[in-house]
Image (cartoon, grey):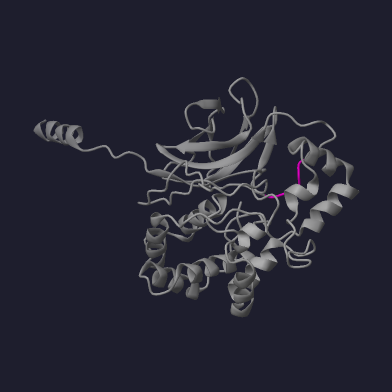
Amino acid sequence: MNHYILIFSLLLIMPIFPIFGSVDDVYTDKSIYYEGETIIVSGTISSENTNPLVSVVALDPARLTFVSIGAPTFANSDGSFSTSITTGGNLWAINGIYPIQITSENHSLETSIEYFLFVEESTPEPTIEPEPTPEPTPESQTNTPKNLEPVSTFNTLKLTIQNFPAFDKSPQYYIDRYNDESSYQSWFDSQFPNYPITDVVGYKSTHVDNFPAFDKSPQYYIDRYNDESSYQSWFDSQFPNESIYNILGYGDPVSMPSWIRNNAEWWATGKINDSAFVSGIEFMLENNIIMVSTSSSGNISNDDIPDWIRNNAHWWSQDLISEDEFINSLEYLIREGIITIK
């Protein structure tokens, strides 16, 4: 009898450990949504539970309140899940970037979408691929500013819609689309009702004939400036008080936040994984800290990130190479499609 009492007493004092789980990945089926559309949210969960419960909410752009709450769902046995949430209503009151938050077993992860209140039936979604992936804070210890807005005194119409015009598209590309596609013309006119297409996507005239040329993309000029010392010297002699970005109609890139250096060191030494490192790159793209076209969509590709990139991250974190050299290695990853941004 005493044995049963002892066993029962031990059971009472044994700690009960909670089931561990984390949201590993979350993404949406599109980048841009209009009033009344359904957002399909998918991703993966790691959990000791076979079918963990998943909930989804949308927050307003200022992150002050929920604007929609989706019906709870259960992840599949392999951890994958798909759920939905609908846009529109009184709380979806402004155009902007809306965070979408997935929670499972007390762990949350975010992505975000761009939302527009209304679009005419004849207006298709623009074929620009902006979009934020936005939980910039890596999964461990980083302290990423949640609502960092780039501060710039440079006035420009470019990038008022994220990634439009894209750095790898020439002004002529957009002008031809505007002239040849009535639906594209309707979309542009609805977004910039008081401006001609050339004012938004084009370059201003300079004292150098045919520079910048409308058939060359901003990326073409930025790459030449960064990669060719003779070209950089020529440009600086012609435009001593302006940057290459200003001549192309863009504000200067925002200064690199200090937490990026921490990310680089932690990733180089294996303290955070590739996905967490890439989320920091996405944050820099979203806030114009680095400016590279992100016309591809997806996650990390099947190609491994080269070891020399990891070395560059470590060397930059230790001030052994310049910030420009580090940024050039990130641009290489994106342009070569080794990583692709959602």
Q: How many marks?
A: 0
Which residue ends up furthest to the front in the rendered image?
207
Residue at 51 percent of width and 51 percent of height: 283
Spot occupied by residue 330 in the image (x, y as percentages of width and height): 54, 65
Compared to residue 138, the image places residue 97 above or below, namely above
Residue at the limit of the structure toward the left, as seen here: 2
Q: Position of residue 97 (x, y in %)?
A: 58, 38
Q: Residue at x 45, y 57 (%)?
A: 256
Residue pushed farthest bottom? 230
- Relative side of 84 to 46, left or right: right
Can residue 125 be found in the magenta stretch?
Answer: yes
Which is more toward the observer, 221 or 280? Answer: 221
| Residue 57 versus residue 281 in the image, above or below | above
Q: Position of residue 208 (x, y in %)?
A: 74, 67
> Is residue 124 in sight in this rendering?
no
Q: Position of residue 276 (x, y in %)?
A: 46, 55
Tell me which segment is drawn in magenta.
124-129
Q: Is residue 324 magenta?
A: no
Observer able to see residue 104? yes
Which is the main secondary structure of the residues drawn in magenta? loop
Quarter of the figure that contains the N terminus: top left
- Between 65 and 240, the one lying in front of the other is 240
Would you identify the image quadrant in which residue 220 lies? bottom right
Q: Tell me the residue at 81%/57% (across/down).
A: 173
Name the foreground residue: 33 vs 255: 255
Q: In the figure, residue 112 lies in which quadrant?
A: top right
Q: Is residue 159 left or right of residue 13?
A: right
